[in-house]
Image (spheres, rainbow, N blue to C red):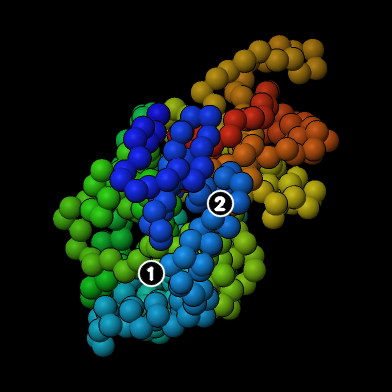
Amino acid sequence: GDRVSKLPEGFAALATSDNAPVAAMGRGNLLGLQFHPEVAHTPQGSRILANFLFNIADLRATWTAESFVRGAVEQIRSAVGDDARVLCGLSGGVDSSVAAALVHRAIGERLTCLFVDNGLLRQGEAGEVIDTFGRNMQMSLVPVDASYRFLEALSGVSDPEQKRRLIGNTFIRVFEEEALQLGEFEFLAQGTVYPDVIESATPERPSAARIKTHHNVGGLPSDLRFKLVEPLRYLFKDEVRRVGLELGLPEEIVWRQPFPGPGLAVRILGPVNRERLDTLRTADAIVRAELRNAGLERDIWQAFAVLLPVQSVGVMGDFRTYADAVAVRAVTSVDGMTADWAQIPYDVLGRISSRIVNEVRNVNRVVYDITSKPPATIEWE
Ligand code: XMP
């Protein structure tokens, strides 16, 4: 909708498009663009940025995972000081795992990781987190089963933003209570990454259009007792992964697909309860297992099942059924900001569908989501 209609004094148009008579303009070393070179879909976008940075602005590329880790470790040490202890919300996802490993590198045993099982995790996930961090990496890890608190808070709630707020608030309350049991903590470390910051209205971007409230950014209550440590706040996912490898985290964790903080609650449209969680969990495990068997996991940014608030008619043997529908969502993406629906081979989709209707109680229909982002988002809520 925006266009430059009149050039400033001394500027020349350097590029045009059907929509924009001045898609780029310049005067000497001053350059302006009226499009997005940074999004993955712009052809040669990275090249345009690189030319500007290295040929025009004369900068050098000194960012490496190693230099980032060095700088971040120093920053964490100076922010936290010599005595304070840090509590980390470890979810087992890439972001919080890398954040925890980074803080651990900076302050060692003054970091305690709290793993809150909110009851909204995928199949087998809680056990995996405890094994990886507690047993293998020997961090101080405290697991807490708080699923009943989250389910109670979510009872009867359908609105996606309200779900996020309730989950965010419950999460922080559980944290505060558990922290009290564990002693004095001044800081809370979180795996907030840059896309979370961009998509939420936060103190540094008060005017950002609010697309979704990310629970680790926007939903924090104002009476929060902790100071925040968010070492990944300005990184994109590919950078977070490079940092994770640099810190020696196992590949299974570094290459794990992103999973939203509010978990399966934003993949169950309508109210969330134990029964619907079980249904979704079983269907979701099938989606992921079949993609893994087909060797497609790494090519796909995220793949999961969504439980729809829709019942439809089916036939099972000689009987008419009237049961739930599941949507399969799989997208490719570089950074989660834009995404394409993944062109999964039909035979893999077929196996996913027949396994779900055969193995998941109360589901008789599977549909595949063929919308990209934009205009859709990756999650359904
Ligand atoms: P959308 O659905 O906005 O998702 O296209 C972009 C990426 O963000 C993840 N996501 C979330 N992560 N809290 C999170 O921590 C949230 O509330 C949330 N909502 C979406 C989503 O899984 C995708 O990777």
Q: 352 or 192: nearer the eye?
A: 192
Estimate the spatial distance between the alpha carbons at disc 2 and disc 1, rounded to whole Å. Answer: 27 Å
The image shows a total of numbered marks equal to 2
Residue type marked 1:
Pro
On the question of residue 40 being in view, the answer is: yes
**Residue at horizontal 62 percent and vertical 20 percent from the top:** 323
Task: Name the residue carrying label 1.
Answer: 231
Residue 200 vertical position relative to residue 112 in the rendered view, above or below:
above
Kindly identify the amino acid type of the residue bearing the numbered disc 2: Gly
On the rendered image, what quadrant is the C terminus found in?
top left
Figure quadrant of residue 1 = top left
Which class describes the residues within 10 Å of circle 2: few (<14), some (14-19), or many (20+)? some
Q: Residue at left 50%, top 51%? A: 38
In-image side of 68 versus 210 (left or right): right
Tag of residue 45: 2
Q: Is residue 335 left or right of residue 342?
A: left
Residue 189 picture location, percent across and down: 35, 68
Which residue appears farthest toward the front when viewing the image? 10
In the shown orientation, is residue 104 left or right of residue 252? left
- Identify the residue at horizontal 74%, vertical 15% (top origin): 315
- Which one is closest to the eye, mark 2 or mark 1? 2
Look at 80% across and 38% down and name the residue there: 345
Query: From where the camera sits, is residue 355 visible?
Result: no
Where disc 2 sits, the SS reads: helix
- Where residue 93 appears, x then y in whole percent? 51, 59
Q: Where is residue 103 in the image (x, y as percent from the top left)?
A: 40, 76
Q: Position of residue 66 (x, y in %)?
A: 52, 80
Q: Within 10 angstroms of label 1, few (less than 14), some, or many (20 or more) residues? A: many
